[in-house]
Image (cartoon, coloured by chain):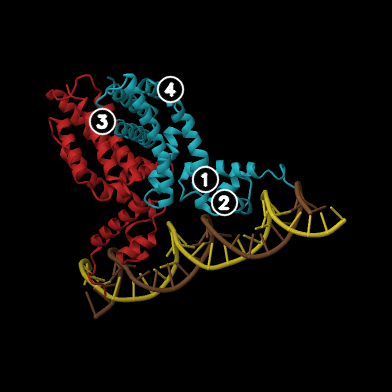
Chain colours: A cyan, B red, C brown, D yellow
DNA sequence: AATCATACATACCGGTTGGTATGTGTCAAG
DNA sequence: CTTGACACATACCAACCGGTATGTATGATT
């Protein structure tokens, strides 16, 4: 009866991606399951067959959609680099040259969920914090390698610096989303890049 | 029949403060009018007498609760200062020494609303952006004065720098809220302070 | 003293929400 | 060929949502 019959993991993937889009647009609490089902052409039966409840769907989105995205965009470019500052500045420059189309309008999916859900639901907070700390961990490790290679000033504290870098980046994205200005976004990234310069040895 | 009879502006103020607390906890969209009324002991009749709808209540909270708070906490200390960097570092130091109790758990009310509402509602975005740009404007003006007084490096761009400072601060608060760690908050503020150092002439 | 707007309280409503119970077609195993 | 688990679809539900219509006590005005 269906077009593609009996492809459960494809169905699950469609649900995850539609849920991601809905959550990215409206946040988790305001995300409508009905809307997600309308987008996918599926029904409640399908949804609640793959996920026990809305919360589980949200947590799965974090782990199976947002995490891979973030890993590809932000983790991979820093993996094994001995010049983290150069790598990060190249990354910022690329982001400034051609910003992701959703950045200025919808913001960072991870940050959005952190701001909305952390105070409200502990399970969400822990899950989001895990992903966030993974990110900080990647930056910290990169900075430590840069410290060994001599690119990074020996006086800095890698963990604190990494935490600040990620925070400042999320801050830039968040404020630019409010301004809805690509120019502001570029300017803010420029200042962040300028800050990275001060970390050189 | 009531304890304090016929005090409309007091009633309005109670509604605003209860709404602020509810919004601060749950965000605007998830904020329940019923809960606000339960907190105040008032009824729908009172609410809809003072505000045409929920949206108007939210916008009034921004203008009449959040704006004065922010002005007192962040604008006032920078007014007319000729050493903005010193003033801001003193401010950060004070915030690090005794953080506002809600910062690490609920975050900044302004940032919360910006992240939630900017993509969803244009009226909210404009109102929030007005307040945000007022903040950036205060910092920009302060930096310009510091530029004249010689405290601030002549090479910096005041507007871009101010935007970044506010963004980074909001980023620090937001990430610390997710971590729910005062230590992380202090560390992040420390890094921001370290950044301010690099702006000296 | 009568009138009338103000400042609420009470009761109610349609719509939407997340969630569930049940039905049904498909496919693989025995 | 039958059975049974899987992968959905359909129908339904209580709870809550924002909003409205109406009632009423108060205080000022004429």
Q: Quick check: A48 above or below C2? A: above
Instruction: Return the residue nearer the eye: C28 or D24.
Output: C28
Q: Chain of mark 1?
A: A
Horizontal and vertical percent position of residue A7: 68, 43
Marks 2/1 same chain: yes
Horizontal and vertical percent position of residue B134: 26, 37
Q: Circle 3 sits on which residue? A: B162
Marks 2/4 same chain: yes
- For mark 4, give the secondary structure: helix
Q: Which one is closest to the eye, mark 2 or mark 4?
A: 2
| Marked residue nearer the N-terminal end (2 or 4) | 2
Q: Dividing the picture into quarters, in which one does residue A167 lie? A: top left
| Marked residue nearer the N-terminal end (1 or 4) | 1
Q: Calculate the distance from the C-alpha at mark 3 to the C-alpha at mark 2.
A: 45 Å
Q: Chain of mark 4?
A: A
Q: Circle 2 sits on which residue? A: A51
Q: Which one is closest to the eye, mark 1 or mark 3?
A: 1
- Disc marking residue A60: 1
């Amino acid at each position: 009866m269906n077009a593609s019959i009996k492809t459960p993991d494809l169905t699950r993937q469609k649900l995850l991606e539609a849920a991601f889009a809905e959550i990215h647009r409206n946040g988790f609490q305001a995300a409508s399951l009905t809307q997600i089902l309308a987008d996918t052409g599926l029904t409640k039966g399908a949804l609640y067959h793959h996920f026990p409840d809305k919360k589980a769907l949200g947590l799965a989105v974090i782990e199976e959609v947002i995490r891979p995205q973030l890993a590809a965009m932000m983790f991979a470019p820093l993996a094994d680099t001995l010049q983290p500052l150069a790598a990060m500045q190249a990354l910022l420059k690329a982001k400034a040259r051609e910003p992701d189309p959703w950045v200025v309008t919808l913001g960072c999916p991870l940050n959005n969920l952190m701001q909305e859900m952390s105070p409200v639901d502990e399970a969400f907070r822990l899950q989001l914090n895990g992903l966030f700390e993974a990110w900080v961990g990647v930056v910290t490790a990169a900075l430590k390698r840069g410290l060994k290679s001599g690119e990074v000033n020996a006086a800095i504290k890698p963990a604190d610096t990494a935490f600040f870098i990620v925070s400042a980046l999320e801050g830039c994205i968040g404020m630019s989303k409010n301004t809805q200005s690509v120019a502001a976004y570029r300017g803010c990234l420029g200042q962040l890049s300028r800050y990275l310069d001060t970390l050189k040895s």
